[in-house]
Amino acid sequence: MITKTEVYKSRVGEKRGWAFSVYYGRKYPNFASALYKTKKETEEQLERFKKTGEYDYYGSAE
């Protein structure tokens, strides 16, 4: 059961964008997403993950 989620600015090397983290009852994230260009897209991908459990290996900002 998901206990917490976060959407935040992030970077991978020189690429900057947004990502989300999912917590399953721990103080640190159990899952961090790929990197996306916009906060809105990241929020949409988080909702997709919560509904289906599916996620992208590469986001739009990578």
Image (cartoon, grey):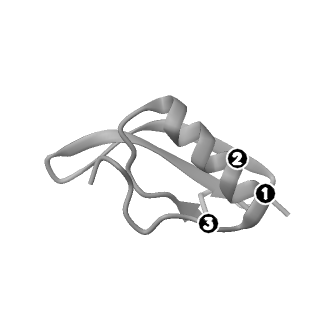
Amino acid carrying label 3: it is Asn
Total numbered labels = 3
Q: Position of residue 43 (x, y in %)?
A: 60, 38
- Estimate the spatial distance between the alpha carbons at disc 1 and disc 3, rounded to whole Å: 17 Å
Is residue 56 found left or right of 15 in the rendered image?
right
Cβ atoms under marks 1 and 2 closer than 8 Å? yes
Q: Is residue 29 above or below residue 61?
A: below
Q: Which mark is residue 30?
A: 3
Residue depicted at 52% across the width and 41% down the height: 42
Corner quadrant of residue 10: top left
Cβ atoms under marks 1 and 3 closer than 8 Å? no
SS of the residue at dot 1?
helix
Q: Is residue 27 above or below residue 55?
A: above
Residue assigned mark 2: 47
User: Which mark is nearer the camera, 3 or 2?
Assistant: 2
Q: Quadrant of the N terminus?
A: bottom right
Graded by Cα atoms within 10 Å as few (under 14), some (14 to 19) or many (20 or more), the crowding at tag 2 reads few
Residue depicted at 70% across the width and 47% down the height: 47
- Estimate the spatial distance between the alpha carbons at disc 1 and disc 2, rounded to whole Å: 6 Å
| Between 22 and 17, the one nearer to me in the picture | 17
Corner quadrant of residue 27: bottom right
Amino acid carrying label 2: it is Glu
Residue assigned mark 1: 51
